[in-house]
Amino acid sequence: MNISLVISLLNEEESLPELEAWIRRVMEANAYSYEIIMIDDGSTDNSWKVIEQLRAQNPNVKGIKFRRNYGKSAGLHSGFQVASGDVVITMDADLQDSPDEIPELYSLIANDGYDLISGWKKKRHDPISKTIPSKFYNWVVRKVSKINLHDFNCGLKSYRNEVVKSVEVYGDMHRFIPLLAKWAGFKKIGEKVVQHHARKYGYSKFGWTRLFTGFLDLLSVVFVGRYGKKPMQFFGTSGLVVFIAGFFAVVYLGISKLFDIMNHVKRAPLIAENPWFFFALTCMIIGTQLFLAGFIAELVSRSSPNRNNYIIEKVLGELEIKE
């Protein structure tokens, strides 16, 4: 199969028929073998009924229905698990991403050897309340990740199949798939300017709060990428530095007290009355706790976290769902 299209959606019943027809025209015009995997992320409208109707008309349409809303990352993760195309393309269901971009996105992976191509909505049809924070956010991620992309959060991306099988997308980590791919060893990451259309139906499901959660997720993915397999290096090093600082403070206190005794200083303050005593005590306690946190993190990292289990209510099409 040439292409797997993975589309995570929430309450998009109005746009789905138009989106499927648009995708089908593009696929047939280019003679691609394909599948459209639509993940209904707990919609409360008739999105799943629409997907069932589209499946009846086009056997290339497949679907996964979550019993409740888990978020976009959960939808993409489930879609990635079952995608069988050589190239996997993700897009939003709101018709703001253009299926006309599919041929070039496919070619950049299949013919030009890229591992991942990220869309860049250079001209956006969004209010300034979204575009300004987005520019700042992307600048920060670009500096932290050392990946020269302008729009990390663009839903329109294409991947080599090996990439989506090698990354674990959970929480809200869908924003950082290029960084996750880089950590997984896929270095050929490119960018393509894509069209961005104004929303035709419904409303945006993302608010301003994602700006704050995005930075927290960035810290999380950077930490996990660098220290997920070796947490003791982070906690142990931090604990050692803090503990040594406390140890030297104790040495200083001991030497000071010894000098006072040798010089017969009268009314010399007790060690416990010296502010450095509390600094030393605090540092040694915190250093020990960091060491213990490191050991616990090492044990946790050796276990198999069960972060990506989602309750799937229904499945359409021949999709092999892993338990």
Image: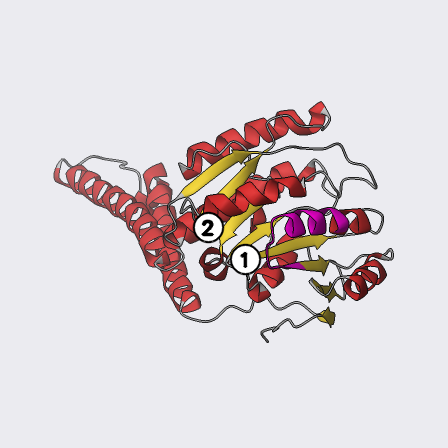
- Residue at image x 35%, y 51%? 234
Residue extent of the magenta highlight: 21-36
Q: Residues within 10 Å of mark 1 (few under 14, many from 20)?
A: some
**Cβ atoms at labels 2 and 1 below 8 Å apart:** yes
Disc 2 residue type?
A: Ala
Say if 243 sits above or below 146 in the image: below
Estimate the x, y position of residue 242 in percent, counting from the top left: 32, 46
Residue 12 shows in the view:
no
Say if 78 sits above or below 204 in the image: below
- Residue at image x 56%, y 38%? 119
Viewport quadrant of the C terminus: bottom right
Q: Earlier in the sequence, mark 2 or mark 1?
A: 1
Whether residue 282 is in magenta: the answer is no
Residue 291 shows in the view:
yes
Residue tagged 1 = 2
- Residue at image x 44%, y 71%? 303
Estimate the x, y position of residue 195 in percent, counting from the top left: 64, 32
Residue 235, disc: none
Q: Residues within 10 Å of mark 2 (few under 14, many from 20)?
A: some
- Mark 1 lies on a secondary structure that is loop
Whether residue 25 is in magenta: the answer is yes
Residue tagged 2 = 110
How far apart marks 2 and 1 lie (CA) works out to 9 Å
Disc 1 residue type?
A: Asn
